[in-house]
């Protein structure tokens, strides 16, 4: 089992949106970075753990715990000319972008980025490295445990 941190802007898809979705599951769409895409396509497996992270908001942080709920499949938004994520170079025969389904597992307490920065066990977390902007990053088992422990303790 692997662990991931996946960033979503809450005004696009929040953790509450996932909790309210049928089967508490949503398609993770709109990734337009090749490295993040490759994580989804080549490394993510159904059952992997996900720290659902709210970004580009007043208080960024981990909003909940989820899991990868599917294997990779073509991101439908790349084919829709009306979508913000449309890619004219993508085709049904040769899709460029990938989605996976993500299922909410546990709420826990919101863990703000500012608090994560104070946790010594997270000092090597990719999210906390200078210049880190990827929307999907791997998380070590130790980092996963530290975040869950803090979220379950109420911050």
Image: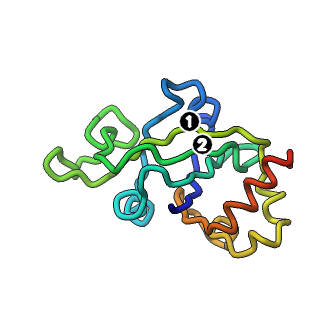
Tell me the residue at 52%/62% (across/down).
2
Residue 14, by quadrant, is top right
Pick the front one: 9 or 6: 6
Which residue position is annotated with label 2? 9
3D distance between C-alphas at marks 2 and 1: 6 Å
Q: How far across and how far down the image is residue 56, in percent?
A: 65, 47
Pick the front one: 12 or 120: 120
Tell me the residue at 85%/66% (across/down).
118
Q: Which mark is residue 13?
A: 1
Task: Tell me: 116 left or right of 142.
Answer: right
Tell me the residue at 40%/46% (across/down).
100
Q: Is residue 48 above or below residue 101?
A: below
Q: Which mark is residue 131?
A: none
Q: How far across and how far down the image is residue 152, in percent?
A: 80, 47
Q: Are marks 2 and 1 in contact (CB under 8 Å)?
A: yes
Tell me the residue at 40%/64% (across/down).
43
Q: How far across and how far down the image is residue 61, in percent?
A: 72, 50
Helix, strand or loop under label 2? loop
Helix, strand or loop under label 1? loop
Neighbor class of circle 2 (other Cα within 10 Å; few <14, some 14-19, many 20+) is: some
Task: Tell me: 38 left or right of 102.
Answer: left
Q: How far across and how far down the image is residue 13, in percent?
A: 56, 35
Task: Tell me: 107 left or right of 69.
Answer: right
Q: Is residue 117 above or below residue 50?
A: below
Neighbor class of circle 1 (other Cα within 10 Å; few <14, some 14-19, many 20+) is: some
């Amino acid at each position: 089992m692997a662990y991931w941190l996946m960033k979503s802007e809450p005004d696009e898809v929040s953790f509450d949106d996932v909790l309210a979705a049928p089967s508490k599951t949503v398609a993770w769409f709109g990734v337009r970075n090749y490295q993040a895409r490759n994580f989804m396509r080549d490394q993510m497996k159904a059952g992997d753990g996900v720290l659902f992270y709210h970004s580009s908001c007043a208080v960024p942080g981990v909003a909940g715990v989820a899991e990868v709920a599917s294997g990779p499949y073509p991101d439908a938004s790349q084919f829709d000319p009306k979508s913000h994520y449309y890619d004219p170079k993508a085709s049904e025969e040769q899709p460029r972008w990938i989605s996976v389904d993500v299922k909410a597992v546990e709420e826990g307490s919101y863990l703000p980025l500012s608090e994560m920065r104070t946790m010594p066990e997270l000092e090597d977390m990719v999210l906390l490295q200078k210049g880190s902007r990827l929307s999907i990053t791997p998380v070590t088992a130790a980092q996963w445990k530290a975040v869950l422990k803090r979220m379950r303790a109420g911050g």
